[in-house]
């Protein structure tokens, strides 16, 4: 184990001499944040909707029909009490809940303003704001069609005093900022960059310059080399995560609502996969450039796009949705957003955490076997 | 006593045979030269002897241990300087020494003593904090050698340690190799420089994975070239070379600076034969013709030519 410490010490000495690397670590996630923040004007195709119709009148049924006919909304759930509404939104399966008050028809007939309540799961700020737009649109058309009819019956005079107003309440992310949705994801990207790209580069660099061959004749065992190479990047990765979370809290005003220790624990589980991928990349590439290409184009980009980091998974084609289940970042992103934005913890996210653990151990095990074989 | 015994060592990369059934012995404390053209299989052989590359077949005993059965023991008892620079350029002199001293598990007191020794032989006393990348080539190689033997191995493998180093630094490096050898360390060294081969106690010439000549420098000169070698000084060297090449009394020709070496056979009678040919028939002025003792270079050109003929007659 002494050898592991010698390697860790050496790695840190080498970090110190390579400021370029810190550039990669710190600049790339910020760039990604900016780029993705701008690029995130994404269409929402299917809106999973819950309806809690307290009125059960002809008019309210007609109103709901408008949503169904629009083609965007899929009414997945008819709630019968308010608890169900809360439950469904917390589960995250429902994007919006439409709550129709029991005096809906009465008020409209009396030409008073009827208030419809919309509850959003706003942790995906992007989707929520788009959906809110759709709903106002449909509601606006509905009331326009409705009131002229009434007025014509009453002698044709238009009194534009009454209408239906959607009252919007958004949970988790009340200001509906996409940034709030993206920034926590950056934690995941940062951790991936450090433990996957930088770790694989550090190994391939030794291959490229020839020092790996020198290490192989020393009494260092392949597994000691592996662990000694990984630990510095785990440390670096966690340092970066803590920096970003701090920055997020104080600069972006996005505090961690859940348990930060659970978040760090989940980060560790996630890092098992990325280190495994990093190791794998280091066994198939001969130059740092190759390692960079393979880890960015072969692993990072597919991971980012299939994980729901940039685009909501619900909007992807079915096949791609299926593929996303084998992407470790998908589970990690769910955990990060859950903990940071919703204040969820282990009891809510233990399935994701377990999946990460199993995936991480398998990837790491397979890669290290390959690493040992390539060295031996 | 043999320090290294190599038995029928073979390495194939796919269908390509890089090292072909090689056997040789190296005595303790000897400087053993390993020569061959690019791609001859020198590095591949050394890497197998260092137990970092598994042989396809065959075995070797390196300092009492089998490379196949006890690779870890082999590694503990050897030092290795690979063909590429083997230290960390982005670490300082001292950090490199500390790292390798550390992974070889040297005790504190022994380590301090060895560190001083490495700094002394590399001429780097007082420059411990210098970044390794900024050292001159010759010094780098001495530092690399020092760290490669920091754990006092019985055997050290040096793969082209002096390539790209200026002649004076090369000389100093060889002084260092002799110093190690006089302490009883066995040194196996590869080189492209034939004058360096003269410093070796024993030499092997390897070509296309096979040993094609071996012995001491004197043995090689005596045993491999039975025919007379003549050194001819003349003008129009290239033209003369082309003419001589075609003569039936000449086996081989090669250029050495502004003179020509030819290996003659039984058809050769005397100098007049050459003078007549060049001066009368081709009006090339011949200044001198001497019978000479062959250099190692003559030997290698000779055996490589023979190997080429054998190879082509087989194909
Ligand atoms: N890992 C490998 N895979 C495939 N071929 C290899 C491998 N390593 C070496 N070779 C081939 O084996 C042959 C011998 O290579 P080797 O490095 O032993 O030569 P060398 O005598 O050290 O040459 P040089 O003087 O250029 O260092 C070369 O043709 C080389 O291309
Ligand atoms: Mg070589």
Image (cartoon, coloured by chain):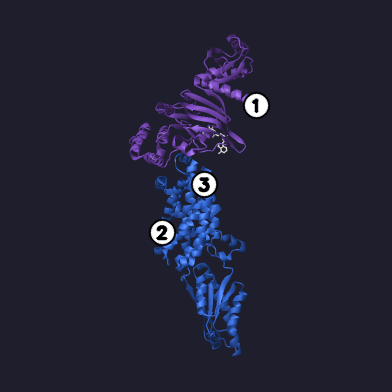
Is the same chain shared between marks 1 and 3? no
Q: Quadrant of ligand 1?
A: top right
Closest to the observer, A189 or B67:
B67
Please name the residue shown 45% across and 27% down the image. Answer: B28
Q: Is residue A299 above or below residue A158?
A: above
Q: Splitting the image into 4 quarters, where does residue B138 fall?
A: top left
Please state the chain letter of the residue tagged with numbered disc 2 in the rendered image: A
Mark 3 burial class by Cα count in 10 Å: few <14, some 14-19, many 20+: many
Tag 1 and tag 3, C-beta contact below 8 Å: no
Q: Position of residue B72 (x, y in %)?
A: 47, 39
**Mark closest to the chain's N terminus, 2 or 3:** 2
Q: Which residue is mark 3?
A: A371
Q: Mark 2 — residue?
A: A242
Q: Residue A219, image x and y in percent? A: 44, 41
Q: A145 left or right of A189?
A: right
* Callout 3: SS: helix
| Colour displayed for chain A in the image of the structure | blue
User: Label 1: chain?
Assistant: B
Q: For the residue labelled by badge 2, is the local secondary structure a helix, a strand or a loop?
A: helix
Q: Are marks 2 and 3 on the same chain?
A: yes
Left/right placement of residue B281 relative to residue B189 reads right
Tell me the shade of chain B.
purple
> Is the shortest distance between ligand 1 and the CB of mark 3 under 8 Å?
no
Sort mark 2 into few (<14), some (14-19) or many (20+) by Cα contacts within 10 Å.
some
Disc 1: CA contacts within 10 A as few (<14), some (14-19) or many (>=20): few
Secondary structure at numbered mark 1: helix
Asked whether the beta carbons under mark 2 and mark 3 sit within 8 Å of each other, the answer is: no
Q: Residue furthest bottom?
A: A155
Marks 2, 3: nearer the viewer: 3
């Amino acid at each position: 184990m002494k050898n592991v410490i010698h390697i860790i010490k050496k790695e840190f000495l080498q970090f110190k001499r390579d400021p370029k690397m810190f550039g990669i670590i710190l600049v790339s996630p910020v760039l990604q944040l900016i780029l993705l923040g701008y690029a995130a004007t994404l269409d929402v195709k299917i809106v999973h909707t819950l309806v809690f119709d307290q009125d059960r009148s002809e008019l309210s049924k007609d109103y709901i029909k408008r949503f169904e006919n629009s083609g965007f909304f899929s009414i997945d759930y008819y709630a019968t009490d308010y608890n169900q509404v809360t439950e469904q939104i917390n589960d995250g399966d429902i994007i919006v809940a439409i709550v129709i008050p029991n005096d809906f028809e009465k008020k409209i007939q009396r030409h008073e303003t009827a208030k419809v309540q919309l509850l959003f799961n706003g942790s995906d700020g992007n989707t929520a704001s788009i959906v809110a737009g759709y709903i106002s649109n449909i509601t606006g058309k509905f009331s326009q069609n409705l009131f002229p009819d009434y007025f014509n019956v009453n002698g044709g005079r238009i009194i534009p005093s009454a209408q239906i107003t959607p009252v919007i309440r958004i949970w988790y992310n009340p200001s509906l900022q996409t940034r709030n949705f993206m920034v926590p994801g950056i934690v995941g990207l940062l951790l991936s960059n450090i433990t996957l790209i930088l770790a694989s580069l550090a190994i391939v660099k030794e291959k490229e310059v020839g020092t790996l061959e020198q290490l192989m004749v020393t009494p260092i065992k392949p597994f000691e080399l592996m662990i000694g190479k990984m630990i510095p990047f785990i440390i670096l990765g966690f340092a970066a995560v803590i920096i970003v979370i701090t920055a997020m809290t104080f600069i972006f005003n996005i505090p961690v609502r859940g348990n930060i220790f659970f978040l760090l624990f989940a980060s560790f589980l996630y890092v098992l996969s990325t280190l495994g991928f990093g190791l794998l990349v280091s066994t198939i590439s001969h130059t740092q450039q190759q390692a960079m290409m393979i880890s960015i184009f072969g692993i990072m980009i597919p991971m980012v796009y299939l994980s729901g980091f940039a685009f909501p998974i619900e909007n992807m084609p079915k096949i791609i949705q299926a593929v996303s289940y084998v992407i470790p970042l998908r589970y990690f992103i769910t955990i990060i957003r859950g903990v940071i934005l919703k204040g969820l913890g282990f009891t809510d996210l233990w399935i994701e955490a377990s999946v990460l653990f199993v995936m991480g151990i398998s990837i790491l095990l397979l890669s290290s076997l390959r690493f040992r074989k390539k060295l031996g | 006593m043999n320090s290294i015994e190599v038995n029928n060592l073979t390495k194939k990369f796919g269908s390509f045979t890089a090292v072909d059934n090689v056997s040789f012995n190296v005595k303790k404390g000897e400087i053993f030269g390993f020569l061959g053209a690019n791609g001859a299989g020198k590095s591949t052989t050394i890497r197998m002897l260092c137990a970092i590359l598994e042989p396809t077949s065959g075995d070797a005993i390196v300092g009492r241990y089998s490379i196949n059965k006890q690779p870890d023991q082999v590694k503990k008892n050897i030092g290795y300087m690979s063909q590429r620079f083997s230290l960390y350029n982005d670490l300082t002199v001292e950090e490199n020494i500390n790292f390798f001293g550390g992974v070889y598990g040297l005790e504190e007191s022994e380590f301090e003593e060895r560190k001083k020794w490495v700094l002394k032989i590399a001429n780097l006393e007082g420059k411990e904090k210098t970044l390794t990348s900024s050292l001159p080539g010759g010094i780098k190689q001495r530092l690399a050698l020092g760290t490669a033997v920091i754990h006092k191995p019985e055997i050290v493998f040096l793969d082209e340690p002096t390539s790209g180093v200026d002649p004076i630094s090369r000389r100093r490096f060889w002084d260092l190799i002799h110093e190690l050898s006089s302490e009883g360390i066995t040194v196996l060294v590869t080189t492209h420089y034939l004058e360096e081969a003269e410093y070796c106690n024993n030499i092997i010439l390897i070509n296309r994975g096979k040993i094609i000549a071996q012995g001491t420098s004197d043995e090689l000169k005596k045993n491999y070239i039975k025919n007379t070698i003549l050194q001819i000084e003349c003008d129009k060297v290239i033209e003369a070379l082309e003419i001589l090449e075609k003569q039936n009394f000449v086996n081989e020709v090669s250029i050495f600076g502004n003179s020509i070496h030819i290996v003659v056979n039984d058809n050769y009678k005397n100098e007049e034969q050459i003078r007549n040919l060049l001066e009368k028939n081709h009006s090339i002025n011949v200044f001198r013709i001497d019978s000479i003792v062959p250099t190692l270079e003559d030997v290698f050109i000779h055996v490589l030519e023979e190997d080429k003929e054998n190879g082509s007659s087989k194909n």
